[in-house]
Image: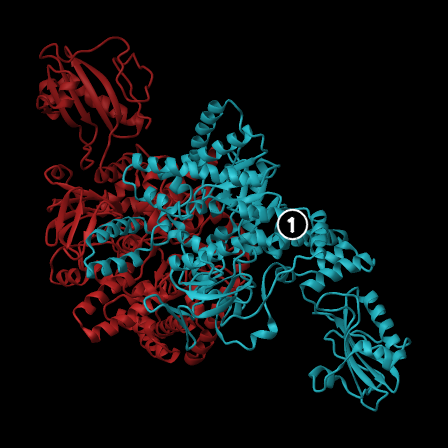
Chain colours: A cyan, B red
Amino acid sequence: MGERAIVYREKNYITKAIADGTAVNIVSMVFGNMGDDCATGVVFTRNPGDGTKQIYGEYLVNAQGEDVVAGVRTGKQVNKLKKEMPDSYKQLAKTCEKLEKYFKEPQDIEFTIEKGKFYLLQTRNAKMNAVSMTKTSVDMVKEKLIDKNRALTRLQAEHLEQLLHKTLDQKAIKNYTQIVKGIDASPGAASGIAIFDVKKATAMGENGVKVILIREETKPEDVPAFFESAGILTSRGGKTSHAAVVARGMGKPCIVGCSDMKINYDKKTATANGKTINEGDAITIDGSSGNVYFGEIPTIEPKITQDFKTILDWAQKSKKIGIRANADTPEAAILARQYGAQGIGLCRTERMFNGRDRIGLFVDMIMAKTIQDRKKVLKKLGQLQKSDFIEILKTMEGYTVTIRLLDPPLHEFLPNPEELAEKIHKLEKNKKTKELEATKIIFNRARELAEINPMMGHRGVRVGVTYPEIYEMQIRAVFEAAAFLAKKKVKAHPQIMIPQVSSIAELNHIKKIYDDIKEEIEKKYKMKITINFGTMIEVVRAALTADELTETAEFFSFGTNDLTQATFSFSREDAESKFLPEYLKKDLLERNPFQSIDVNGVGSLIELGITKGRGVKPNLEIGICGEHGGDPSSIKFCHGANISYVSASPHRIPIAIVAAAQAAIELSKTKSKQ
Amino acid sequence: MGERAIVYREKNYITKAIADGTAVNIVSMVFGNMGDDCATGVVFTRNPGDGTKQIYGEYLVNAQGEDVVAGVRTGKQVNKLKKEMPDSYKQLAKTCEKLEKYFKEPQDIEFTIEKGKFYLLQTRNAKMNAVSMTKTSVDMVKEKLIDKNRALTRLQAEHLEQLLHKTLDQKAIKNYTQIVKGIDASPGAASGIAIFDVKKATAMGENGVKVILIREETKPEDVPAFFESAGILTSRGGKTSHAAVVARGMGKPCIVGCSDMKINYDKKTATANGKTINEGDAITIDGSSGNVYFGEIPTIEPKITQDFKTILDWAQKSKKIGIRANADTPEAAILARQYGAQGIGLCRTERMFNGRDRIGLFVDMIMAKTIQDRKKVLKKLGQLQKSDFIEILKTMEGYTVTIRLLDPPLHEFLPNPEELAEKIHKLEKNKKTKELEATKIIFNRARELAEINPMMGHRGVRVGVTYPEIYEMQIRAVFEAAAFLAKKKVKAHPQIMIPQVSSIAELNHIKKIYDDIKEEIEKKYKMKITINFGTMIEVVRAALTADELTETAEFFSFGTNDLTQATFSFSREDAESKFLPEYLKKDLLERNPFQSIDVNGVGSLIELGITKGRGVKPNLEIGICGEHGGDPSSIKFCHGANISYVSASPHRIPIAIVAAAQAAIELSKTKSKQ
C-alpha cells in the first residue's frame, strides 16, 4: 500500500524510495552476523500494542535479519541495546525520531549494526491495533507532529470497531476447532451453549445462561430471544436480513448466511463440514469474521479510552454531515446519545410489538375477523405504543426523533406456514383436536397473508391503506405522547415518516388521516402540536417522482437497503447467501452494495431524488437510514451529495462520526487542489 | 364523453349544443302522442350491428319517446315509416345525411312527428360493435366523408379485441349462474369441464375433451396442459403472472387472481360465494370480463373481415414505430406474421424446456450433482434447442428474431416444495420407500434452490454466471442454427439478449462466453456469422447505467413488466390479487401499471435509459417487450419516447398496429397545433 523504504547508510546517502518495502543497499550488503560487534533488530518507534511513545522491539547480536524475524533465536528487548551498544542505540533513537518526523507515522524499522556501524535497512508504517492507533493519534497532535485532520484521517473503520466490541484473543484461536464460516453480520465475539429453540433460548437467557441461538432464519416474534442470547447464528439470510439488522441494532454478535450449515430441528443438531453441533454444546461465534468454533474462546473486552473520546470530539467539530441513530428502544437511545448521536433518524415501531407482552395482542389484531374486533385490540396497543413513545422521546429530549409507521408485511408476525403445516400434521397424529383447530385457523390466515415475494408485496403504506385503523392508532399514539410531554414541559421533537411510499397519491392518503388526528388532538388538549410529516424514499418510483412528493413531505429519508434491493433486483435476503460472494470473487461487483452504497447505480438514483426534491424545496431535510448509514465509504458519498444526516445503529455511531469527519477533510482537500 | 345534441326544430332554428346529450326544445314541447298523425322513433343512421349504410330503428305512432325506449309497446321497423308517413320519412333521411356530414360519425337519433311536422329531438354518436365500427370506418372513407386518419382514430382497442376473440352471447348470459369474478388476464370466452389436475387436463384435452384447467397457480411444467385446455382459471396471480403471460401468448382465455375462490385439491372442488364447482362440472370462463359461470354459454366466433384487413393496411402505412411479436414457437411466429408483425422482439427460450419430452431432461440438468453430469444433459438439450431455433428462424425468414437466454429461477422448473412436502407425508404414511427417497432428493434440491423473494433472486444472467455451461449451451445452439440455415441459404436474422442484467460487468462476463463460441463456430463452418448481442433493460440499475452498457450492448430491450415491478416495489404476482384493485378504487393509481406504462414513474426511468443509451450510440435500436407492448396508451408513450419498436403477443399485434398509427396521427396533430 505504498509503503516507502529508505536505505539510509550514512547521513550523506539517502537513496530513493522503493514502493514494496524491500531493503536495498545500493552501496553493498551489510552483515549483522560477522561477530559480536554486529547485531540486527526490528523495532517500532512506538508500542504497537498500546501506543506508548517508546522504542519497542528486539535485536540479536551476531545475526541477520531473517533470524530475528523467523524467531529462530529469541531476541533481546531493544532497551538492552542501550547498555550493550550505547552509540548504536543513540543512532537508532535519532533515526526513529527523524523517520517519524519525515513520514508523520510511527515506523516499523529493521536495522543492522556491522562492526559497530549503524545501518538502517528498511522502514515502513507500523501496523497498529485500535488502542495504539487512537493513542498515537492524540499524542502526535499534542507533539505537533501532525494536525487534527491528519489524526482523523489515519484511522480506519476496522480500528474503531475493535474498540467497541469484544474480540477473540487471536493467540488463543489456534487451540480451538473452527466448525464453519458464515457472513459477518454484527461484530463482536460471544460464547454460549448452542440452543435451537427460540422459547428455550429466551428462558435460559433469563436464567442467566449464556446461549447462542441457532436458527435457519428469524422473525419479529423471535426478538425477545435476541435480548436474552449472547449471540445469534443463522444458516440463511444476509447482512440486511432480519437477524442481522436486529442484532446490529442491539450490538449483539451475529453470523448469518451460514449456508454450509444444515440444521435439523427435530434432532436439534447443526452439521457443517463433517462436524456436528448438538444442542447444549459450547460454541463461540465471532461476528467480526463470520467464524464459528467449538468451545469457549477467551475474549478481549472493548476499551473506550479517553484518547478515543478525544478523537470523537475532534471529529464532531470537523464533520459537516449530521449523525443520528437508528434506535427503537430507550436503552438504544441512551447508548446513541452517549456515542454522540444528534437525534434518532429511524425509530421503527414494529419492534414495539415484539415484546412478549405485546406479540400476542398484535397477533390478535391480525387474526381479527371484523374491523370492530381489530379496533378493540388496536385501542389496547395504542396505549402501549403511547407509553413507548413517551419513553423514547424523553430519552432524546431536545433532539428530533423520526418515527416510522408500521413497515413489515403482516404475515411476518405470524408463525411460518411451513412450520404450522408440520405442527398440524403432528397434532393430527396425536389427535389433539382443540389445539389442532386453533392452529388451523392461524395457518389459514398465515397462508392468506403469505405472499410469493413478501418484501415487495403488501407492506408499509400499502398496509396503511388497506388497514387504515392501524396507522390511525400509531399516529394518534405519537400525538398523545407529544401532548403528554408538552404538558410536562419536556422538549420532545417527534416526526412521522411513512414507509414504502411510491406516489404522492399514497402519501396524501395517509396525510388525510394525520390531519384529522392532529385536529382532534389539538382540540382535545387545547394546544398546537408540531409533528413534521415526511416520507421514506425507498421505492424507486419515489426517487423518480421526488418533486411531486415535496407537495406534502416535509422531509425525506432514503431507505438505502430497500432502494439497493429494488435497483439491483437483488433480494437482499437471498443474494448474500446465494450468489453475491461469487459475484464479488469474479469482480462482477466492486463491493457488496448492501454494505457500501453503489455509487454508479443506487447513488445516481439518490442524487436524482435529492435534485428533484430540493429543486422544489431547497431547504428540504434529507437523511438516509439504511445500514449504509454506518459505512464509511457510504458516508463519504452522502457528504458529497449534500445529504443532511445519516442514521446508523448506536454501535456504529462513533465510526460514522469519524467517517463523516474524514469525508469533510478529504473533500476539502480535493477542492483546494482544484 | 362530449356527445353533442342539437335540437333542430326547423331549418331556421339551430340551438346550441349541450354536452350531456339531453334534448332541449327551446321553443316549446313537441308531442308525438296527439293522434295518429303523430309518431316518435329512435334510429341509427347505419346498422349498429354490422355497419350497413341503412337507416335502422323503430317508431311508434301516437307515442312519446319514453314509450319507444322503454319498449312498452313494440315499435315498427322504421322502413315502414316510408309508406306510412312518406314526407316525414324524407325529412328523416335528409336529417340523417346532414347530421352524419356534420358530426362525421354515424348517429343515434330520436325524433317526433307532431301533426305531420318532423322534429329532431336528440342526436348523439352511435355506439357500435367491432364489426360495424370497422365497416363504417372503411365505408366513410370510400364516401369521402372522413379521411383515413380519422377512420383509424375512431377505433378503440376494445373494438379490435372483440374481432379477435370468441365472445359470450350477451343476450344468453342472464340464463346462467355467475359463480365468481377474477382478473381478466387473457381475452376470449371458453367452456369446458372443470379439471383440477394438470396431467388429467392434458390427457383429456388430447382426447378431444374441452377442459377448463383450475389451479391455484401454474408453473412452466404445466404448459402442455395450456395447449390442451380450452381455458385456464387460477385463484392466485395477476395479469403478468405465469398463467396470464402464457395464456395471452397462446391467445387462450384465462382468468387469474380469483381470490374469492378456494380450491381443495383433495376433494377436487372449488368454492366461491357459497357455490361449489366439482370436478367434471361444465363451466364457462370469460377472459375478457373475468367472470366465471356454471354451464356452457353460447359464444360468438371472432370475425376477421376484409374491412378489418383494410384498416390494418392503412395503419401499417400511418404508423412510425415498429411492431414485433413475443413468440416462442413456430406456430406463434406464423400467426404473428399473419397479423403483420415485423420480427420477433422476444423469443423466450425457457418454454422450449417445457415440452413433455423436454421437462424431464431439464429437471435432470437441475438435479445434476457435478458439472460433468450437467454438461452431459446440456449436450442433449443443446441439440433440441438448436432444432427449435432452426424452426422459428425459418418461419421468420428475413426478419429479426431476438432470442432471450434462460430467465426464470431454476427452482421454477421443479415441483413446489410445499406440494412435495405433502407428497412426502403421504408416501411415508403408505410406506412407499423407493418413491419416498426419490421425492426427498427432489424436495431437498427444491428447498435448496427455493428463495424468499424468487423473482428477485437467483435468475437470469445471475444463473448464467453461476452455471455458465447453461448459457454456453444456448449460445452455441443459436450459432449452430444460424450456420445451418446459412448453408441452406435461408435469410435468418437471430440476435441474442441477456436477461436481468444490472451492470456492464455482468454483460461483459457473458460476452466473453459469446465471443469464444462465435470464434469456435465461425472457424468450424468457415463462415462469418452475424448475431447481434444485446441486453434487457429490466433492472432499474441497467436503466440508470445505460450509458455504460452501450460499451457492449448492440441493442436494448426494455422488460417493462419487471421494470414496473422493481420501480413500484410491487410484486406483480401479489399486487394484483391483494391490493391493486383497492388502489384503483381509491384513486391511488390512475391505471394498472402492469397494463399501461406508468408515465410519471416507470416512463421517466425508460426515458432516462433511452437518453443515456443514445447519448453514446445515437442509432441504438431500442424496443420494449413487456405486456405493455400490446397496450394502446403504452404504445403512445413509446412513440413519443422514440422507441424503435414494441413487441406484443401475436393476438395483440393488430391492436398494436392500430394503436401505433393512432399515436403517430395524434402526435402529429399536436405538433401542427404548436
Looking at this view, name the residue that lies furthest to the top. B28
Q: Is residue B534 visible?
A: no
* Residue nearest the observer in this picture, B396 or A199: A199
Q: Is residue A45 above or below residue A66?
A: above
The chain holding disc 1 is: A
* Residue nearest the observer in this picture, A480 or B210: A480
Q: Position of residue B403 (x, y in %)?
A: 38, 63
Q: Position of residue A64 (x, y in %)?
A: 77, 86
Query: In the image, A95: left or right of A463?
Result: right
| Dot 1: element | helix
Q: Position of residue B590 (x, y in %)?
A: 38, 37
Near mark 1 (Cα within 10 A), the count class, few <14, some 14-19 or many ≥20, is some
- Name the amino acid, label 1: Gly
Q: Is residue A545 above or below residue B527?
A: above
**The quadrant where residue A379 appears:** top left
Name the residue beneath numbered marker 1. A640
Looking at this view, name the residue that lies furthest to the bottom. A34
Q: Position of residue A637 (x, y in %)?
A: 62, 52
Looking at this view, name the residue that lies furthest to the front. A207
Q: Is residue A76 visible?
A: yes
* Residue nearest the observer in this picture, A185 or A565: A185
